Image (spheres, rainbow, N blue to C red):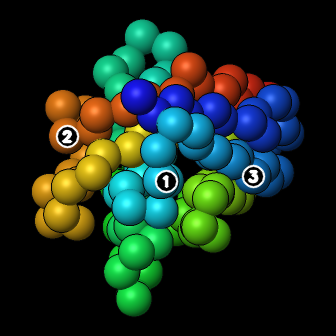
Amino acid sequence: QMQLVETGGGSAQAGGSLRLSCTASGDDFRKYCVAWFRQRPGKEREGVARVSPATISTTLTSYADSMRGRSTISRDPDTVYLDLDNLNPEDTAVYYCAAAWRPWNSCTFETYAWNYWGQGTQVTVSS
């Protein structure tokens, strides 16, 4: 059973930046698609960004409309990062890391596509 842990959340001022990190234990993280989701207060969980497994030669990434242009996902073999830029108070949310062992085109932003979830890390942006 793989376990995911998110770190790097916290408080930021509007216009600021944060880097979130996701690490895993219990299985080979490299073979998984990994995504970041967020859940704002009173809203449904929504996708932010996703990245292909580290076992394929070309890294593929995809961004949801939620933070397109203000987020960057990247990975080294054992950690997946989410850089958040130009934050605004509407970005206040719990950010979750998720992983799935399936082909890239099946790693969609639908929450049911993801097998493993972290506990989340809180990001709070003040104006």
Quadrant (top left/top right/bottom left/bottom right) for the C terminus: top right
Q: List x then y, in percent, for residue 5.
A: 63, 32
**Residue where numbered disc 3 is placed:** 19
Up-down: is 73 above or below 119?
A: below
Pick the residue in front: 80 or 88: 80
Outermost residue toward the bottom?
57
Q: List x then y, in percent, for residue 68.
A: 45, 62
Residue type (three-letter) at the residue carrying disc 1? Phe
**Residue where numbered disc 2 is placed:** 113
Q: Residue at x 47, y 44 (%)?
A: 27
Mark 3, Cα crowd under 10 Å, few <14 / some 14-19 / many 20+, is some
* Quadrant of res 25: top right
Report helix, strand or loop for mark 2.
helix
Pick the residue in front: 42 or 1: 1
Residue 61 seen from this side = no
Image depth: mark 1 or mark 3 in front: 1
